[in-house]
Image (spheres, rainbow, N blue to C red):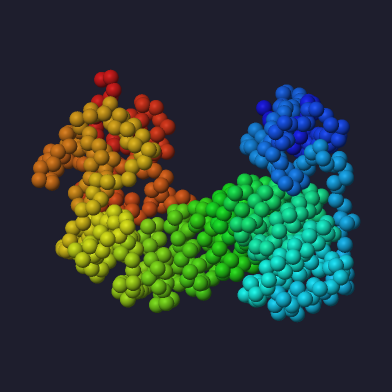
Amino acid sequence: MCRYQFTVAWGLPEIIVMSQPSLATVRVAVLKLTRAAARLSSAGHSTLTSTCTGLPTATCRVQSDPGKRHIHCSQHRLAPPSSRNVVSVSSILLQDGLEIQELPILIRLLDKGMVPLTNHTFSGERIRPMTTEDENFQYLLQQCESVRDVFKLLEIPAQRVTGYSASAALQRVSQLQKMNSDWDDLHSFIRTAVMRELNDTVGKDVAQLSNETLLELVSCYMTMESFEQSCMSAINGEIEKRMVEEQFSIDDLCNLSQLLRASPRGDRDLINSVWVYMGNHYRDVTETSLAKVLACLPPSHKYLLKVLGKQFHKIWWKMPAEQAVGCVASLVQLNSLQVSMMTDLAHWLFLNIHHLPEDGLMQFVAAFVHFRFSDSNFTTALERYIGARGADMNTNLLGLVMEYCRTRRFFSPTILDAAAKHFVQHGETYSALQLFTVLRPFGQLNYMPKDCHGFLLQSEKMLEKRFTDFHPDHLAELLCSFAFVDRVPLNFVQKVLTPTFFSKVKGLARPHEAGMWLEMLQSAVKLDSRGVRVPYLYKLQAGQAWKGERMKMLQSRLQETLDSMIGNSLVRMRTFGSNTVYAIDAEVHVNDRGQPIPVSYHGGQPSTYAAVRLAILILTADHYCVNSGHLLGEFSMRQRHLTKLGYTVVKVFDAEFLPLTRSERQKYMEKKWQRWIRTAKRSGT
């Protein structure tokens, strides 16, 4: 079922039936309805009158059956029209079976006091070009250094003060007011009389002024309190008329929107009309104007990003570098993730990264980090760029790229090795924040660079040098990241695992985050560095491992399967290994005959009958890098520590386990532990 719905600014007791209408056909139908409304209005048709000054509206719906689509019109009421009563905002809602989108349109409003639509058509013939006399007058105005000088210059015959001259005078007075000129020194009667005359002249000749002059007047009345409301309405009304007749360029409308948004005095209805026009003419946006359109787009009209994205898809390949960077920056400013546009931007970067300066590339990477968006073209372009630039890169750009790899769990030895090389050569110039951003992905992505020795020496040197500059939260996370790759920073353990540092952690806004890193660090000190004394023990996060809805479901299915296989008395769910903060999803002890026995500990030591202790771990896609089967550092350290504690790790992969039936899950687990358990009790036996 395909539905089209739109609203026009008149009520008509008609039904139009159309077979498979296109968008152009629907627009023609709207125009015909409006013209018909005008003819009925001029004839005084009774259905078009209203006891409450509001206008009736027609709501039209296109319904699709196997062979036809129908447009139905029914009457509703609109709120009373605005004082300008020139155009109305309407829209078409399109549904193609995959998505619903809004295509706004402008419809001319008529009432009984207005002549038919054809007499309102604006052809541009009324615009009067600026004469030499107008240009000379504007030059004289610029020589005026006070409002009094402007008023003296205006003491000329009235017929010589045209709309252009009055507009220029208003603009000059506005400029002088901002300069704290002698406005307050003039008699209020003189000020009021002159300003009224200028406003009346502009209002009378507004239809003859150029588009550029109209925009300059908008800028003027936005900052000038003495601008009369009637003149403002005349200017806005003329702008709306010209928008309907497509007399403004996309660039003009962008400038107009920026002017109106710059002050609370901006006409919100006019802003809305501007962007309705933009939505209706999005195909007129080019590769050189799209960035400006996005930069001017108000947050309240973000719905237009859908149609602008369709136009972007057609023109992205010929977009200059500065325009592409502008589009990226605007999307971040609007905080709106547009998948199609981000995909096209990634493709653009893949083809044009050699033309993009470093600050432009930083904008791209920052946007992909901000939206947490992954794309193969983007990552390929980064690998090629970083691999080619190597040690010549900007440090801030390198930090952004490393942050993208970390947050998106993208494992790239090319980027990591290039970052290590850059750090070894330029680490002396790194700030504490740059050290934190560049170094922590190595441990969290579970990778040590090729030049491991030089990298670790430089890391220790710079950590010692910048130690006091680090934020406590950053320092705890960075030191723990080295422990992930089995490189415990012993020289700094004595500085952070202390009551003094603990007091700093307790004073943080989120102390539990730093505490989590410190607890993992002290576990690494105990298990990876035998004989090293831990000066202070953190106990902030033990037993508080994160557990999402999917993990709860997996653990429930695992418990159900193990209970049916060996009985719930022989399985212990959600335990913690001693001296670690890592949870074991299920623990099973097996004797020397391969039979499960109850899980028991005495004084922290397992039962003497337990020949094998199985630590069953559920692994999800979040535990691995997105582009490979490379295990992340935190979960690699968990497995390493459990093995050192004497456990035998059994891995259960969620993508394999969750879709199985009950009997299939039992077979899956039998296959996983068949080396250690010879017999198992099946359900029903």
The structure residue drawn at horizontal position 24% and vertical position 70%, both measured from the top left corner, is: 491
Tell me the residue at 25%/59% (across/down): 506
Place of residue 57 in the rendered image (x, y in percent of width and height, measured from the top left): 72, 33
Q: Could you say where residue 393 lies in the image, as x and y percent from the top left?
A: 51, 72
Q: Quadrant of the C terminus?
A: top left
Using residue 207 as the reference point, say whether residue 567 is left or right of it: left
Could you tell me if residue 390 is visible in this image? yes
Residue 346 seen anywhere in this rendered image of the structure:
no
Q: Which residue sits at x=74%, y=57%?
A: 231
Figure quadrant of residue 573:
top left
Furthest residue toward right: 125
Q: Nearer the viewer, residue 135 or 124?
A: 135
| Residue displayed at 35% across by 55% down | 633
- Total numbered circles: 0
| Quarter containing the N terminus | top right
Q: Residue furthest left?
A: 603
Q: Quadrant of residue 333?
A: bottom right
Residue 557 pos. (x, y %) = 34, 32
Q: Reply above or below: 491 against 657.
A: below
Judge by depth and name the residue closer to the eye, 355 or 278.
Answer: 278
Counting from the top left corner in percent of width and height, residue 278 is at 71, 50
Nearer-the-camera pick, 500 or 414 = 500
In the displayed orientation, state which residue is furthest to the top.
684
Q: Is residue 533 left or right of 50 when viewed as pictured?
A: left
- Using the image, determine if residue 478 lies above or below residue 578: below
Quadrant of res 461: bottom left
